[in-house]
């Protein structure tokens, strides 16, 4: 459809052609959301991320009902770690490193239980799942070509974490010419203050690299 909706957002409302808009759900994986995964091995309190699930589920249900293109992403690496930069694997002092065996399988490795998306937001068979080795969803993936093939101009972005993979993806998307509208309550961080600032820096300066809205405003605009 070429119908256009206007979403209440900051710094100002944004009008989107729904047929040229994709819902992009970033890294809602057990590895970030649940104890025993990558997020917790880094020393984080994973319970901080749970608040994003219901708002994302609401946006996902609306997107499915409206026939909007839905794209899920997953951060992770090949079992032989050939796509994992040694500098990334070596970073910090995690209790388990990328590739080490954990309670949900090998940490951040494709095909392992912990790498998969949480049951509440599980992709349908007809939805696109992008496996990405980096924080941004465009880097070393087919995402850009897929969006071009579908004629997408606008991205509704949510997921975890606000200041890492969501921010990186929105910055990448903005530079590629996409209008990026972030669903604030559909994002979360291990650090509440980073969540808040991660959203603020997107919408500051007249929306320097995007817009920030919330799930209720998206649902209202899609009605
Ligand atoms: N650690 C952290 O905040 N995030 C990540 O490592 N990846 C994503 O944000 N998905």
Image (cartoon, helix red, strand yellow):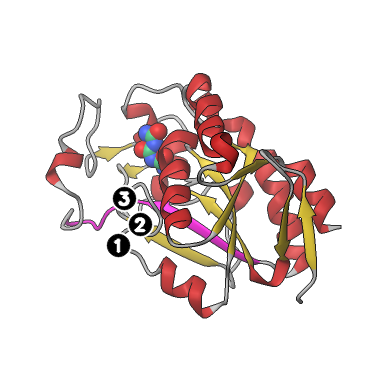
Left or right for 193, reference 75: right
Left or right for 223, reference 135: right
Q: Are marks 2 and 3 in contact (CB under 8 Å)?
A: yes
Q: Are marks 2 and 1 in contact (CB under 8 Å)?
A: yes
**Label 1 vs 3, first from the N-terminus:** 3
Q: Is residue 76 magenta?
A: yes
Query: For mark 3, what is the residue?
Result: 134
Residue depth check, mark 2 versus mark 1: number of the one nearer the observer: 1
| Tag 2 secondary structure | strand
The quadrant holding residue 122 is: bottom right
Q: Which mark is residue 140?
A: 1
Q: Is residue 132 magenta?
A: no
Question: Between residues 70 and 197, which one lies in front from this camera angle?
Answer: 197
If the image is split into quadrants, where does the C terminus sit?
A: bottom right
Measuring from the top left, give residue 64's x and y in whole percent. 72, 64
Q: Tell me which image quadrant ligand 1 sits in.
A: top left
Measuring from the top left, give residue 118's x and y in whole percent. 54, 46
**Span highlighted in magenta in the image:** 69-80
């Amino acid at each position: 459809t070429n119908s256009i909706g206007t979403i209440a957002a900051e710094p100002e409302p944004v009008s989107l052609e729904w047929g040229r808009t994709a819902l992009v759900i970033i890294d809602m994986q057990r590895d970030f959301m649940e104890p025993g995964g990558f997020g917790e091995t880094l020393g984080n309190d994973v319970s901080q991320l749970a608040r994003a699930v219901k708002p994302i589920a609401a946006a996902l249900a609306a997107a499915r009902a409206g026939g909007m293109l839905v794209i899920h992403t997953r951060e992770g690496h090949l079992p032989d770690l050939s796509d994992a930069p040694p500098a990334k694997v070596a970073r910090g002092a995690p209790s388990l490193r990328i590739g080490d065996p954990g309670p949900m399988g090998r940490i951040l490795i494709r095909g392992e239980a912990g790498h998969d998306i949480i049951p509440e937001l599980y992709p349908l068979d007809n939805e696109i799942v992008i496996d990405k080795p980096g924080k941004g969803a465009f880097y070393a993936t087919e995402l850009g070509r897929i969006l071009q093939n579908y004629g997408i101009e606008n991205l509704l972005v949510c997921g975890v974490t606000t200041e890492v993979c969501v921010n990186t993806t929105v910055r990448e998307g903005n530079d590629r010419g996409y209008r990026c509208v972030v669903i604030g309550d559909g994002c979360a961080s291990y650090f509440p203050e980073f969540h808040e600032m991660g959203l603020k820096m997107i919408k500051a300066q007249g929306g320097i690299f995007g817009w920030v809205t919330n799930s209720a405003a998206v649902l209202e605009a899609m009605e």
